[in-house]
Amino acid sequence: MGNSSSMLTQYDIEEVQGHCNHAFSQQEIVSLYQRFCQLDRSSGGFISADEFLSVPEFAVNPLAQRLLRTVDGLNFKEFVAFLSAFSPRATLQQKIEFIFKLYDSDGKGSVSYKDILDVLRDLTGHFISEEQREQVLKQVLEEAGYRKDSSLVFADFVKILGNPGLKMEVEVPVD
């Protein structure tokens, strides 16, 4: 499975399914493997940040630079685990964990006002002013019971984003 030119065995497929908490069917995993092999231009068994940027939907994502920190050098199992947060079968917990990692840029397990503001800046670009961003963020935090100087941990994200209707889905085409 490390070499992208090899074929997936039934054991490999089941192992990957377990690694991603069964977020994808066996057929979807085979399709993802084919896509992984297409992206892995060097056939080294890993996808680089540059190879990820060859996916148009990824390249135009306003959070692409943040996502690149998570995806650079992924092997196939890690690639599927990364994508599993976007599966309709992913749990709310998996989706929130993914979002938390995007906001927790230093990986220390907490998210500051500045971290959230940085993500908001990435998402809004020049469409709103810095003052408007800060105003919106301050209001959202206050409505959720937090202050500007609060440092949010994962449990806080669960509390804020714990809506079962949270949508973060992509479709995996199955040939």
Image (spheres, helix red, strand yellow):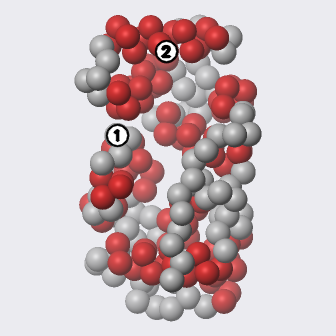
Percent x, y for residue 101? Answer: 54, 41
Q: CA distance from mark 2 to mark 1?
A: 18 Å
- For marks 2 and 1, the one nearer the N-term is 1
| Up-down relation of residue 64 to residue 141 (above or below) | below
Which of 100/165 is in front? 165
Q: Residue at x 66, y 31 (%)?
A: 161
Q: Which residue is mark 1?
A: 62
Label 1 packing within 10 angstroms: few (<14), some (14-19), many (20+): some
User: In this rendering, is residue 8 above or below 83?
Assistant: below
Badges 2 and 1: C-beta atoms under 8 Å apart? no
Horizontal relation, residue 12 to residue 39: left or right? right
Residue type at tag 2: Leu
x, y percentage for residue 32?
A: 50, 74
Q: Residue at x 54, y 78 (%)?
A: 174
Q: Position of residue 27 (x, y in %)?
A: 61, 81
Q: Quadrant of residue 157?
A: top right
Q: Callout 2: few (<14), some (14-19), or many (20+) C-alpha neighbours within 10 Å? A: some
Kindly tell me whether residue 46 is visible in this rendering: yes
Q: Secondary structure at mark 2?
A: helix
Residue 116 or residue 91, whichever sits in front: 91
Q: Amino acid at mark 1?
A: Pro
Where on the picture, by quarter, is residue 28?
bottom right
Relative horizontal placement of residue 144, taking residue 102 as reference (left or right): right
Q: Mark 2 sits on what residue? A: 137
Whether residue 19 is visible, yes or no, is: no
Q: Position of residue 137 (x, y in %)?
A: 49, 15
Numbered-mark total: 2
What residue do we see at 55% from left, 81% from top?
Answer: 30
What residue is shown at x 36% (from left), y 54% (from top)?
Answer: 58
